[in-house]
Image (cartoon, grey):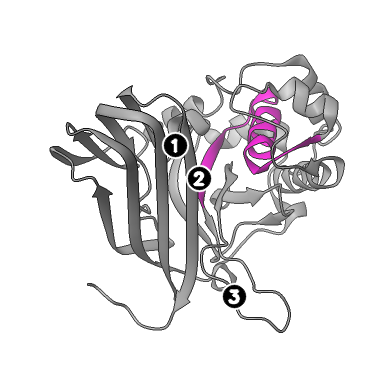
């Protein structure tokens, strides 16, 4: 097992006082077959008047809180400890031996009805990934008839990695995939949305994943605190394997260094922090993330 201690701090500074706010945070890791969250503590300043936790429709941990005192700064800090299972210890089908992508529905008949219904949810368009002709046109060359599904997905992920430039600041939540394709650039969120849109255009289920990726320090230098960031990738259902993670930003299959925070149809379902404020004017946002590997479990 690999154990990680994650610190994620979000800090807002407002130009005008905020009299009240209502918020939802999806910043605590999920418990999954290959991932166990030992603990996750949320600290909010100023102190909330009320707070509660729940599990949403997609199985994500949601921390809701209300602040009723006037403030011009808001800090949400989440400290979590997560253990992941090395994927190298798990069996995986060779790309050329998986079922042909265009025979996917024949194999879906052998999946229980509950899982079938869930998969259809991830085939339909979603708020941030609507149907798009140019997205399907981009997808087509990866999906010739009878091509093994896993081989086709690997090819799509590789094409996105080589065809698009990672450029922070190019896109926002409202940037359509058509613009991402036209300009051939974006960030991890855009590349995950694009891959999902391509797969759905071919009638295949794909879900958006939000989380963290353990990063390496520069050669010969210690890893700096707080230089990590949230990451986005996608899960695709492979009949012989189940849901498998793919990262088009780094052109690789998700492994034990990937830590899942939330899953959904697109980014709108997994937004780390959202809510309503009264007042505030403009704001300045600072986010600091640190993903550190540990050797022992701590539960304090």
Q: Residue at x 18, y 45 (%)?
A: 47
Q: Which residue is mark 3?
A: 223
Q: Earlier in the sequence, mark 2 or mark 3?
A: 2
Q: Does any portion of residue 18 appear in the rendered image?
A: yes
Q: Give the quadrant of the C terminus.
A: bottom left
Q: Residues within 10 Å of mark 3 (few under 14, many from 20)?
A: some
Q: Is residue 187 magenta?
A: yes
Q: Residues within 10 Å of mark 1 (few under 14, many from 20)?
A: many
Of marks 3 and 1, the one in the foreground:
3
Q: Residues within 10 Å of mark 2 (few under 14, many from 20)?
A: many
In the figure, is residue 200 to the left or right of 208?
right
* Image-quadrant location for residue 24: top left
> Which mark, residue 270?
1
Q: Does any portion of residue 140 appear in the rendered image?
A: no
Q: CA distance from mark 3 to mark 1?
A: 28 Å
Q: Give the quadrant of the N terminus.
A: bottom left
Q: Earlier in the sequence, mark 3 or mark 1?
A: 3
Q: Which residue is mark 2?
A: 210
Q: Residue at x 79, y 19 (%)?
A: 134
Q: Quick check: 227 above or below 268? A: below
Q: Quick check: 152 above or below 29? A: above
In the figure, is residue 117 to the left or right of 214?
left
Q: CA distance from mark 1 to mark 2?
A: 7 Å
Residue 68: x percent and y percent? 17, 31
Magenta range is: 185-211
Cβ atoms at labels 1 and 2 below 8 Å apart: yes
Residue 176: x percent and y percent? 68, 21
**Viewer-nearest residue: 235 or 224:** 224
**Viewer-nearest residue: 111 or 228:** 228
* Image-quadrant location for residue 277: top left
């Amino acid at each position: 097992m690999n154990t990680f201690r994650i610190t994620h701090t979000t800090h807002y500074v407002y130009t005008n006082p905020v009299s009240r706010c209502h918020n939802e945070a999806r910043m605590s890791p999920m418990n999954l077959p290959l991932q166990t969250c030992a603990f996750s503590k949320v600290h909010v300043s100023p102190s909330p008047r009320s707070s509660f936790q729940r599990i949403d429709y997609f199985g994500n941990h949601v921390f809701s809180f209300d602040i009723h005192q006037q403030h011009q700064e808001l800090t949400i800090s989440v400290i979590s400890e997560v253990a992941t299972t090395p994927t190298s210890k798990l069996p995986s089908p060779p790309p050329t031996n998986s079922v042909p992508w265009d025979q996917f529905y024949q194999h879906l008949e052998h999946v229980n009805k509950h899982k079938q219904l869930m998969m259809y949810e991830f085939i339909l368009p979603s708020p941030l990934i609507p149907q798009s002709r140019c997205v399907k046109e981009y997808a087509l060359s990866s999906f010739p008839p009878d091509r093994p599904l896993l081989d086709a997905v690997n090819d799509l992920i590789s094409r996105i990695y080589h065809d698009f430039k990672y450029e922070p600041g190019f896109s926002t939540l409202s940037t359509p995939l058509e613009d991402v394709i036209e300009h051939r650039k974006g960030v991890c969120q855009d590349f995950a949305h694009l891959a999902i849109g391509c797969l759905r255009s071919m009638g295949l289920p794909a879900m958006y994943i939000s989380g963290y990726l353990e990063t390496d320090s520069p050669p010969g230098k210690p890893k700096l605190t707080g230089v990590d960031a949230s990451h986005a990738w996608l899960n695709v259902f492979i009949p012989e394997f189940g849901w498998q993670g793919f990262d088009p930003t780094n052109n690789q299959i998700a492994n034990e260094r990937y830590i899942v925070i939330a899953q959904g149809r697109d980014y709108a379902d997994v937004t780390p922090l959202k809510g309503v404020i009264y007042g505030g004017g403009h704001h300045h946002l600072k986010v600091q993330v640190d993903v550190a590997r540990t050797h022992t479990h701590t539960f304090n």
